[in-house]
Image: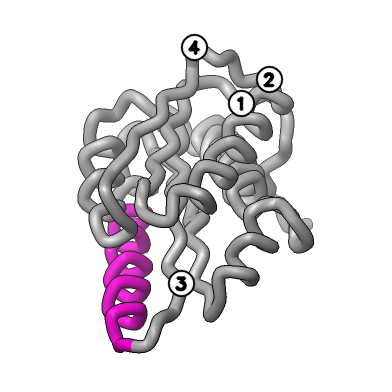
Amino acid sequence: MPRYFEGDFLPPKGRFAICVARFNGFITEELAKGAVDTLVRHGVADTDIDVYRCPGTYELPGLTRRVTESRQYVGVITLGAVIRGGTPHFDYVAGECAKGIGSVAFAAAAGAPPTAVTFGVLTTDTVEQAIDRAGVKAGNKGAEATLACIEMVNLYAKMAATDGRKA
């Protein structure tokens, strides 16, 4: 019979970091509020949450790398908002951000102990779409990225318990 491993939403053990871009702050601050609220509602103490702010979404991968390399956190949530404009700038920023955070997430998952990194960066065509995803109509994507992070932290802990590695 196969064994199945999944994360859950039980109160996770450890510290969490939220890396949030200040650019489009009217959106990213709502995402950050959703992230903090979700952590607290799932049993994470305020004192176990650190929020790091950087200028923009392009800077998020570098910040996230430094935060994960500190090995202080079991989970890191990245938050930003890139809204399409009239130039190709959107494509460069969104693409490099996604690629960079993905690279950091792969490396952090392989670390000892592993760190879960989740992507809560909005990439929208309009300001209205971003507002909707920051809590107006389509839920709060900061909260959703945080739920994914909690689940991955708990999954990594379950995996460590079965293979003898430190979670």
Can residue 60 be seen here? yes
* N-term-proximal mark, 2 vs 3: 2
Query: Disc 1 designates what residue?
Result: 12
Q: Where is residue 2 shown, x and y percent of the image?
A: 73, 57
The quadrant of the picture occupied by the C terminus is top left
Quarter of the image where one finds residue 73: top left
Q: Is residue 69 above or below residue 84?
A: above
The numbered mark, 4 or 3, whose residue comes first in the sequence reads 4
**Label 2 near label 1: C-beta < 8 Å?**
yes
Disc 3 and disc 1 in contact, CB within 8 angstroms: no
Q: What is the span of residues highlighted in magenta in the rendered image?
A: 87-106
Q: Residue at x 33, y 58 (%)?
A: 57
Q: Position of residue 64 (x, y in %)?
A: 30, 45
Q: Nearer the viewer, residue 101 or 108?
A: 101
- Name the residue tied to disc 2: 43
Name the front one of labels 1 and 2. Answer: 2
Q: Nearer the observer, disc 3 or disc 1? A: 3
Measured in 3D between alpha carbons, the distance from the residue under mark 3 to the one under mark 1, in whole angstroms, is: 33 Å
Compute the Cα span from label 4 to label 3: 33 Å
**Most foreground residue, 118 or 37:** 37
Mark 4 and mark 2: span between their CA atoms? Answer: 11 Å
Q: Tell me the residue that label 3 is attached to.
A: 83
x, y (%) of residue 9?
72, 36
Q: The residue tagged with tag 2: helix, strand or loop?
A: loop
